[in-house]
Amino acid sequence: MDTKPLSTFRGKVWQVVPSVCAMLMCLPFGIMSGWPSPNYPTLTKPVEEDDTMTDPIALIRFTMEESAMVAGFLLIGHTAATPFSTIRCLRAKYGIVLGATLMTIGWIMMWQARDIYYLLGSRFLVGAGNGFGTGQLKYYIGEVCQDSLSVFLTKQINLYVFAGLILAFAFGPFVDFRQFSIISLVISILVLFVTIFLPVPPQELVKKNKIDKARKQISFLSPHLNVDDELSKIEKKLISEDTDLSYCDILKNSSLRKNLLLFAGTIFFQQLSGAPANLVYTQMIFASCGCPHPELCALVYILAFFVANVYGIFCVPNHNKKHVLLFSCVGVSLLMLAQIVVLIENVNEKFWNFTSLVVLLLFIVVHTVGLGNVPFSLIPQLFPKEAKKVVGQFFVVLHSLLALAITKTFQVMFDQIGLLAPFCLFLAISSLSIFFVIIFVPNNHKSTKIHKDLS
């Protein structure tokens, strides 16, 4: 009987299952990311003097002007913790547990919220937990899995965040603030419980000089592989971690410096073309457009966002990235123009109530497939593998800061002028992105030869 296929299957199962359990860490962050859309319509209502005696959440209500700040603290926490996510003084497993613990504490604060400062602290802790934990999660997957499987599973990390978004949009409109917090806290506690029991990968055992235990684990997980060869690969991987480039190395190299500016430009247009603000204020946008059942419209919207991300993550890399990006920029501009016409002509009221829903669904799909996914996929094309870690951190920090900026800008314009104004801003930025992509983004086959320049 040939046991090799069975051994190979067992090895893959023991690589995939721990990785999937570890990626569950992203669910509480995804739920917190979706928290504003179902909760803002209630929490931003004006508070009357008598409400403080009868309304259990009157003291934690806030103004529309403060809503962007509340939303932004999640990103501030995420940004603050990301630079520390590559610290290796902890085992990757315990880094994941620490991240899950911070998020659980954050949800406890949300459940026990007494004023707006509880909300700010809660969102900051959840953001910080995910910002730190995601970096550790990538290490863990790389240590547990073989290279090809590691790349495939790492691509799926964001899908768990988006799954959390779907959960928030699905149950959020049908429960009150406290019930939402309790449900999310229970999910966070379950995730923390799972992460505590994650197995220690062989690479960690080698790092601690527990070679015999590492041998036993390798022979159990992958009996069809040569143990000595696997140990040799692990030792080489540990040595290669010391060759990663720093920010200074990138800035000193003219080719890498130009590519970093190009990369930053793609992130700028990705974020400022409107998607982050639409995801934060989804339900309020549909209500303002006059769509019936805005909470259900928001759920359909986030489901379309998830499906588009699945396609963007797994299928878009097979196409010419410049062409996909250009298609996305043009499509986003045309759809934003269509939405502006819908608002000016009151198409929702005169013709069909769900016109804005259809237009915005197409907008988020076209945006996500191109502008939403292509910038990050440009990293291997623009940078050597030694720069992957630092460029990934740069992406997360800039991505979060720009999301914070456009969310606040949207809130101010929406509150002071109306919904039409921010959509006009998104149209202007997405139109500029067309010229940026045509002029600066290279074709796949014209990837800059930067490896030779590193010396």
Image: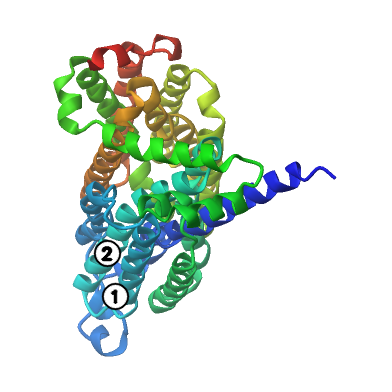
Q: Residue at x 35, y 69 (%)?
A: 42
Label 2's element?
Answer: helix
- Quarter assignment of residue 122: bottom left
Circle number at residue 109 = 1
Q: Which residue is drawn at 18% across and 15% down?
A: 254
The answer, for residue 350, to whether it is visible in the render is no
Question: Is the residue under label 2 in contact with that under label 1 (CB below 8 Å)?
Answer: yes
Q: What residue type is labelled 1?
A: Met
Horizontal placement of 169 versus 80: left or right? right
In front of the other: 101 or 211: 211
Q: Which amino acid does label 2 sit on?
A: Leu
Horizontal placement of 389 versus 145: left or right? left
Residue 154 versus residue 180 in the image, above or below: above
Horizontal placement of 178 versus 153: left or right? left
Q: Residue at x 22, y 18 (%)?
A: 258
**Residue 450 location in percent, x, y?**
30, 15
**Residue 400 location in percent, x, y?**
27, 45
Q: Check the image and name the residue furthest to the right.
A: 1
In front of the other: 345 or 118: 118
Mark 2, other Cα within 10 Å: few <14 / some 14–19 / many ≥20:
many
* Quarter the N terminus occupies: top right
